[in-house]
Image (cartoon, coloured by chain):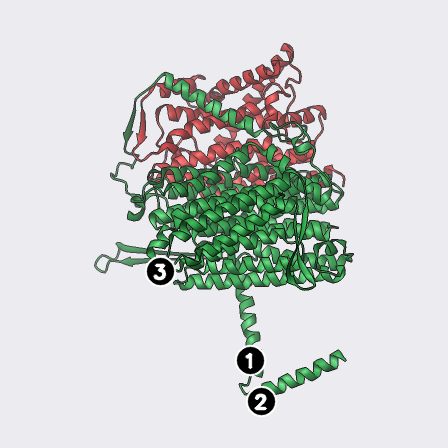
Amino acid sequence: MTAWLLAALQTLLFLFMAPLLAGWVKRVKCHMQNRSAPSLFQPYRDMAKLFRKHTVLAEHASWVFRTTPYIVFGATILTAAVVPLVAVQLPTTAIADVIVLVGFLALARFFTALAGMDIGTAFGGMGASREMMIGALAEPVMLMTVFTMAMTASTTNLSEAVLFTLNSGLVLRPSFVFAILGLMMVAVAETGRVPVDNPATHLELTMIHEAMILEYSGRHLALIEWAAQIKLMIYAVLIANIFLPWGIAAEFTTEALGVGAVAITVKLMGLAIVLVVWETVMAKMRLFRAPQFLGFAFLLSLLGMLTHVILETGG
Amino acid sequence: MSPLILAYLSLFCALASGITALNAERYPWLLRYGSSIWLGLCGLLAVGAGGWSLIDEISLIDQVRLGLPWLHWHLKLDPLSGFFFIVVGLLVLAVSLYAPGYLQEYVHSKIRSLASLGLFTGLFVFGMLLVLLADDAFVFMVAWELMSVSSYFLVVYQHQHSANRRAAFLYLLMAHMGGLAILLGFGVLASFGGSFTFDAMRAANLSLAWASIAFALTFFGFGMKAGMVPLHAWLPEAHPVAPSHISALMSGVMLKIAIYGLIRFTYDLLGDIQWQWGLAVLIIGAASTLLGVLYALMQHDLKRLLAYHSVENIGIILMGLGLSMIFINAGRPALGVLGLIAALYHTLNHALFKGLLFLGAGAVLHASHENDLNNMGGLIRRLPQTAIFFLIGCLAISGLPPLNGFVSEWLTFQAALQAPSLASGVLRTIIPITAALLALSAALAAACFVKVYGVAFLGVARSHKVAHAHEVDIGMRAGMGLLAVLCVIFGIFPAAVINLIDAIPQMLLGVKPVSATAQGWLWLTPISPRVASYSAPLVVIGIVLFALISYVLMRAHPVKFRRGYPWDCGFGALNSRMQYTATAFSMPIRRIFAPVWDITEQIEELHNPTQPQRTEIIRHQLHVQDKSWSRLYEPIGMLVIAAARRVSRIQTGSIHTYLAYSFFTLLLLLWVVT
């Protein structure tokens, strides 16, 4: 029972810390680029504002458009519930393994793209087409890195995989180096960051994710943006906890949980800084350079897997 | 009463359905209702027979005094055929609900023969069920040909268009090439076993070389029928031109009969499975998966697109089978069972969602007389219920949780991830790469069905006919609804399905997958709970719960909703032609994977003669063709024609020469015989 309670708490933590992570990224980015930074809590204020505003629906929007925010939000929270944030061995991780987790994200993407097509404008179709293209290329890379991890730990259960890395101590696995690089590149592409997409722009011809959700307003937009923030945090936590799990709570004592919370906060802050540096030094790519970017990520994850098969199993 | 009697009854109902339709020219209701009721009964009985033999895990054999004097028909119903009986039965049942409404138009137009449609539908179903019951090669081939030939007549049914006749001929030709290969495969086994009965074939003692030859022949033959790459060319030509409910049967079920043949031949008759065979099946499966979905993405004819997706899904089934064969040979029967179950589960799932999608495409065709995605749009408002069913089909075929397509793909992934336990380094490398290809294909399939659903059902109508479509009648909706509900149920309760089908590996391999459902109906743990687990019921509860909570919280503080114009960049009125079309949607993917197709693109600009700098008209022509035509079929066709030309030299046209040929042949034969 404690375990289920902790799992619920952890999910809530995930839910309400995600905007904070987004605020942190924005703030560090502003400092990096010599701009005056908004408050750390700006995302919460934006969201509160959106929730209060009237909602405008496009005239041709059907029920698909209206239910999509809820489905996307529901699928994203469920994904968050499965990912070990502060503690491992929580019962929720058994509901879905890491392949199912990729499936949840695909489900959310499927509905977002449909909502983009629903309003019958060129932008919606354009965003949907591009998003599905990038998603189609990113998903196999994500699964390849996950497969590398899964074959090393011989499990696709996230909690077990984290425990495996935790218990095997500080060993250097060449395959993990490749896998973490591949996963980071995928995370950048999937969460719509520079160089694949730019969350800050509404320049009509270059946007991808923003083009799909262009017609959303008010509380629908708030839900979708919240889901996007949670998704960013999910990828960050995956990278942090699968490959660098140290500090995560393996037992449910107050001490261990406290250490776990501090550890994940530090890791996420660090990863956010990496992301900000990356976004600051890179320029956004043309759309048709994105496949090359993801192709490179695929190559990295393939190398990671082959390294594992050839070097690490000693066959 | 026994399952076999039920199976006979269902065969009888299929025949009766065909015969009832014979008088349909005079009384069209015979086809719409009489024939369909028999067909529905046939479906129900087939599900009953299959379910009974699968649950009770019984095998029944029987001999019928038909056929050759020295070889009576041997028939057998065991769990494997029982499972396929269920697959056929479910689809036939859905089709029988759907057919009366769909055939209405055929009855009214009166330009086509109704009797032949009903007769061949009945014979087609009869043939498929008889293949499943066959326990000797003779019955098998008779039933197989009955199925092939009657489906040929259904493909050529709308023969007014020359393209349909061409497609049907191609189908007939390739079906018989495949049939020949299967016959030869049986021949090899029969010559070692000494008899045409399957029992004798099981006992046959083959050398490795002969077993491999027999496997290669049958893999070619069944693969051709199943539509694996590169033997798939007939499939996207033939399936779309049949009436839609027949397309559903062909794509949903007939291809599965070929899978049944492959499993029966390899696992049951040949026995001793080699890993090289498994590798061949796995690689061809992976190629079919990827190429099938890529070709599908380029289509904008809805039924052709769905037909290409059958190639993809057959690929996924073959991947499961290939993995299973590799693991069995490596002495890991538990994993072999996992692969086999993944393949069987996907067989069932594909039958359901592909049947559903073809019926949906038929409903759209029926309501709007439109088959080209680029002319559709906004159908969700015209056909609200069909739209819901079609969405379920799209989600299922895209392999998204928590629907059924996801479960079988997940099981395939789980089997593939056990590759590190194999001894061979080559296999350890190849298997994960094929798994990555499967992941790529699944993601591309999702892209393809966003395209299909987005362009056809969402947005604004692109043509007048589509804008005035009407929802189809209750029977058609019931047919689609049945399949949609099954797609959801089989997605949410995978443990129950696996509990049902684990009688098949028990029979074929003598191993039962204990661990997959060991944690109760809520959990699916294919290897062990530590390695991987998935709980579809909890996933559904989770998503629905979170979505509901957020919805209820929102409702607690209502805000105003109003309708407004979508963003038009300030240029004013958007029209339906400004939407992305199917072709535009898949353009980025066409550009990335360009080498896969033969693409010819022409852009022609016509200038105004008085103002040369102004472009008056732009004509854009795009033609994307399956590469297998230019690389495989056309060269073979040329070769055949060239050879025929050589051979035709001996045809002088004079009877004397031909008599001389016969005489010398006779002499030669006599000399050979003595």
The circle on residue B656 is 2
Quadrant where the C terminus of chain A sits is top right
Closer to us: B273 or B666: B666
What amino acid type is highlighted by mark number 3? Ile
Q: How far apart are marks 3 and 1 (CA)?
A: 40 Å
The circle on residue B648 is 1
Residue furthest left in the image: B610
* B156 with respect to A218 (left or right): right
* B121 with respect to A257 (left or right): left
Residue A10 position in % (x across, y down): 56, 18
Do callouts 3 and 1 mark residues in contact (Cβ within 8 Å)?
no
Residue B357 position in % (x across, y down): 46, 44
What amino acid type is highlighted by mark number 1? Ser
Residue furthest top in the image: A254
**Chain coloured red in this rendering:** A
How many residues crowd mark 1 within 10 Å: few (<14), some (14–19), many (20+)? few
Q: Image height check: is B656 above or below A239?
A: below
Which is closer to the viewer, label 3 or label 1?
3
What amino acid type is highlighted by mark number 2? His
How many residues crowd mark 2 within 10 Å: few (<14), some (14–19), many (20+)? few
The circle on residue B111 is 3
Residue at image position (57%, 32%) is B493
Q: Distance between the residues labelled 2 and 1?
A: 16 Å
In the rendered image of this protein, which colour is used for chain B? green
Residue B499 position in % (x across, y down): 64, 35
Of callouts 3 and 1, which one flags the residue occurring earlier in the amino acid sequence?
3
Of callouts 2 and 3, which one flags the residue occurring earlier in the amino acid sequence?
3
Closer to us: B28 or B97: B28
Q: Can residue B386 be seen in this view?
A: yes
Residue at image position (40%, 42%) is B475
